[in-house]
Image (cartoon, rainbow, N blue to C red):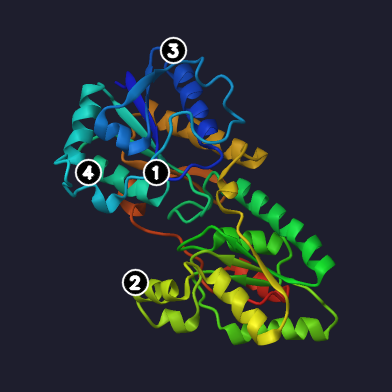
Amino acid sequence: MVKRVGILTSGGDCPGLNATIRAISKSLYRLFKNKIEIVGILDGYHGLIHGKYRTITEKDFADILTLGGTILGTKRTPFKLMQVVEEDNIDKVSEMKKNYNKMKLDCLFCLGGNGTHKTANLLSEEGLNIIALPKTIDNDIWGTDISFGFHTAVDIATDSIDRAHTTAKSHKRIIVIELMGNKSGWLTLYSGISGGADVILIPENPYDINNILSHLNKRFKNGKNYSIIVVAEGAYSISEAKIKKKKRMELRKELGEKTATNIIAKEIEKLTGFETRTIVPGHIQRGGSPSAYDRILATQFGSYAATLAKNEQFGLAVAMVNNKITSNRLSDVAGKAKLITLDCPMITTAKQMGICLG
């Protein structure tokens, strides 16, 4: 029987984490008629490794539905290092198992993205009772149509694009906006379409600068004296696609650039003479209060996860599939990324709207 559970938030923060913690906790108290103890593990897997935790009571989650960030704190602990004994001589997996048992946990809820899910699966394979919940503004977790935090980030990114339109039009400029998304372009694609971008560049579809220039020139010939280009931070060109990522980063370092954004802006200005500026909203995309949609989604996910614990169903990852809350086996989804395919309906929509995809 489940009597004591732990909750941790790992990886990058995003809106909806606190709403999910609240939903799990409130649901557990009701399902178990208050005969349940809840432990909040601090700073993600780092806290589980080092035994950092505190008891969570109803007072802790009373007013956190609308609160951004995470009351438990978070820290990135890369999966690739989980089974590596570093200079501190700590066997991370062994310490996590030891602290799980030391805390007398019957179940651990792991809220996070792809890396979090991989570690959650590792712990599940080690015999711990794990339930994972999908959090990421990248929306790239395999097996779920949507992750909490994504819609809020789209709202924020779209607002940035909206504001760029007014200044670009006033000054007759091209503005290149860099959005988050190292491996997947969901945030950029959705925000670009909702923000009326003229060019959208994503990691899944390497760009040709000549196609971009042709599109911009065509717009100017048609009387459009400004353009908005939205770029995922992980985007790269067709020529860069021919070389390995390490070499790509070395070449960019020589140019003094880490991402494609400034490279594209410089090339446009050099080859067309159009005045070009860059905008990087950065971590603002992760911040602030969750949208109404994400509050509802987080509440649905958290409530469902609590029910899984009540039914002693472990080794699972909560998901939404075809507008229905469900779950997948962690072993089936961990280590897989949901990337955009070129036959994706949203890609088709973008093309039909006359958006250049590079």
For the residues marked 1 and 4, what is the alpha-carbon distance in whole angstroms? 14 Å
Indicate whether 209 appears above or below 128.
below
Q: Earlier in the sequence, mark 1 or mark 4?
A: 4
Q: In the rendered image, which residue does mark 4 sit on?
A: 125
User: Disc 4 marks which amino acid?
Assistant: Glu
Query: Residue 279, image x and y in percent?
Result: 64, 61
Do residues under tags 3 and 4 come within 8 Å of each other at their CB atoms?
A: no
Q: Residue at x 52, y 42 (%)?
A: 14
Q: Residues within 10 Å of mark 1 (few under 14, many from 20)?
A: many
Query: Residue 265, image x and y in percent?
Result: 62, 74
User: Disc 2 marks which amino acid?
Assistant: Lys
Q: Residues within 10 Å of mark 2 (few under 14, many from 20)?
A: few
Q: In the rendered image, which residue does mark 3 sit on?
A: 34
For the residues marked 2 and 3, what is the alpha-carbon distance in whole angstroms? 53 Å
Q: In the rendered image, which residue does mark 1 sit on?
A: 317
Q: Quadrant of the N terminus?
A: top left
Q: How many marks?
A: 4
Q: Quadrant of the C terminus?
A: bottom right
Q: Residues within 10 Å of mark 4 (few under 14, many from 20)?
A: some
Extreme-left residue of the structure:
89
Query: Residue 220, image x and y in percent?
Result: 79, 82
Label ID, residue 246: 2
For the residues marked 2 and 1, what is the alpha-carbon distance in whole angstroms? 32 Å
Q: Residues within 10 Å of mark 3 (few under 14, many from 20)?
A: few
